[in-house]
Amino acid sequence: MAAPIPSYDAFARRAREIFEAIPEEFTEDVEDVFVHREVKRHPQIPEVVTLGECEGSPVAAMTGTGIVRSLVHLWYGSFVDLAKRDETFDVDAELVETIEHEVKHHLEDKGGTRALEDEDELFDAHARFTEGLPVPAGWYRAGEKLEPGVWAVESDVFVELRLRKKEVDALRGKPLSMTVLGEPLEVDIPADAKPGEPLTYEGEGLELEGDEEDGEPASGDLHLVLLVR
């Protein structure tokens, strides 16, 4: 049974409680936490919502002191949207994780690093790719490198295969045997395959933890990218 969704007021009180429980050495220069009632949706992928965001303080920017000060934003409507779509969505646990994530963004901004920014950009690129929207070439290389020429982005696996043009031409419309992560794999190369455009093979990626289909572990997809060297 799904946990009850808290009211806006209860959510806002809990957000303040979580934030104030974080040691002040980490939240110093975070000016405030704003809880918005509405949903914040991705501009091109409506089912993707933003739970929180760390914004540089406009006031601090105007003063020109050079001190990094931030505002943390939370979208109550986004939490409600996900909770209604997924009965396993734990609003409180996600609220804790989101606030801590945004405070880490603040600390990275102060330290001049961007690991979390890169992580967020990778998530966005993956969502765009999944929806067939434009993404930069080689964007998946920001994911986890599993072995030379192989990267993982969540449960999807991206494999680059560098060939001569005549080798790519010879593969079109034929099966290709290869080894990925120590496992043999045979895939069919479409007759209209184009270098640089990922070829997707459903269910050939990494297993999804805690997810099953027809009693079998569910898996992500494998995307093969033929590159001309």
Image (cartoon, rainbow, N blue to C red):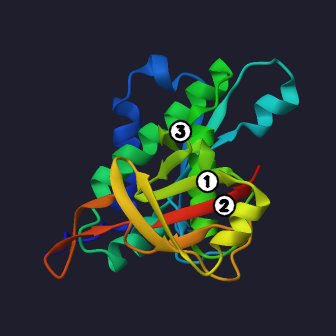
Residue occupying image coordinates x 63% and y 49%: 121
Residue 48 shown left or right of residue 55 in the figure:
left
| Residue in the foreground of this view, choosing between 128 and 49 | 128
Q: Are marks 2 and 1 in contact (CB under 8 Å)?
A: yes
- The residue indicated by pointer 1 is 161
Name the side, left or right, on which 112 lies relative to 74.
right
Quarter of the image holding residue 137? bottom right
Identify which amino acid the numbered label 3 is placed on: Pro
> Could you classify mark 2 by the number of other residues whose Cα lies within 10 Å: few (under 14), some (14-19), or many (20 or more)?
many
Earlier sequence position, callout 2 versus callout 1: 1
Label 2 amino acid?
A: Leu
Q: Secondary structure at mark 2?
A: strand
Q: Quadrant of the N terminus?
A: bottom left
What's the CA distance linking mark 2 and mark 1?
5 Å
Residue 226 circle label: 2
* Position of residue 171 measured from the top left corner of the image (x, y, whole percent): 63, 71
Kindly indicate whether the residue at mark 3 contacts the one at mark 1 (C-beta within 8 angstroms). no
Which residue is at 51% across, 47% downward? Answer: 151
Q: Quadrant of residue 196?
A: bottom right
Task: Count every numbered label the image shows and give the total.
Answer: 3
Task: Looking at the image, tell me whether mark 2 or mark 3 is earlier in sequence order.
Answer: 3
Q: Amino acid at mark 1?
A: Leu
Determine the secondary structure under disc 1.
Answer: strand
* Visible residue check, residue 205: no
- Categorize mark 3 by other alpha carbons within 10 Å: few (<14), some (14-19), many (20+): few
Q: Of label 1 and label 3, which has the lower sequence position?
A: 3
Of residue 15 and residue 2, the one placed in the foreground of this image is 2
Task: Identify the residue at image location x=53%, y=52%.
Answer: 52
Task: Identify the residue under disc 3.
Answer: 148
User: Could you say which quadrant of the image residue 186 lies in?
Assistant: bottom left
Rendered image: mark on residue 181:
none
